[in-house]
Image: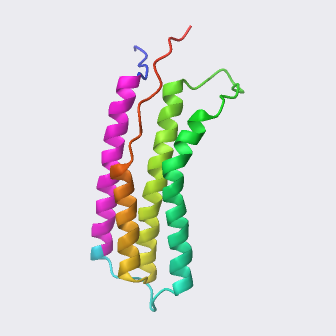
Amino acid sequence: MPKTELTAASAVSVMRALKASFVVFSFLLIFLAYKLPSQSASAAETIVEFAISAIALVDVALGFFLPGYLMRQPVRPPRGNVQATPVQRWMTCTVLGLAFFESCNLFAFTLHLLGARTVVVGVLFAVGICSMIVWDFGAPPADIPQH
């Protein structure tokens, strides 16, 4: 069976598909929040809403800045024989950014289930989805031939 190598072009197409999947999942979460009533007997405390919203917004900021920061860090020598290629590192960092954006949507869904105000839940969903749509994952590093 031939070994399939990850190239920069194939990595970009995989990341486009992943980004679209994450956006679709976010809309499915909104649909689920619309169909499921809040599970809490009482509304969430304002301090709980604030704390979870703050964490969600920090996650969005991390989604924008952490992948680029991690890509600029020097590569440490691996412990084993397997070393990630620059394209594989880029993909890992990009998926990490998408996961941070999605966590904002998951926090919004959690707040909905806790009985938080609809405005707070809606804003977090909007921030999470808009961040994913607006965010550009950039170009992967050039392919480096393996020796």
Residue farthest to the top, as pictured: 147
Residues 73 and 104: in front is: 73
Region rendered in magenta:
8-33
**Quick check: 1 above or below 57?**
above
Residue, x 53% and y 40% (percent of image)? 68
Q: Give the side of residue 41 with respect to residue 134, left or right.
A: right
**Quick check: 122 above or below 137?**
below
Magenta stretch containing residue 30, yes or no? yes
Residue, x 39% and y 47% (percent of image)? 135
| Image colouring | rainbow
Q: Give the side of residue 134 with respect to residue 59, left or right.
A: left
Kindly report the secondary structure that dominates the magenta region of the rendered protein. helix
The quadrant of the rendering that contains the N terminus is: top left
The percent coordinates of residue 44 (x first, y second) are: 49, 86
Magenta stretch containing residue 137, yes or no? no
Residue, x 47% and y 59% (percent of image)? 103
Total labels: the figure holds: 0
The percent coordinates of residue 134 (x first, y second) are: 35, 50
**Quick check: 109 above or below 129?**
below
The percent coordinates of residue 83 (x first, y second) are: 61, 23
Report which quarter residue 105 is drawn in.
bottom left
The quadrant of the rendering that contains the C terminus is: top right
Report which quarter residue 13 is drawn in.
top left
Residue, x 52% and y 86% (percent of image)? 46
The percent coordinates of residue 125 (x first, y second) are: 37, 66
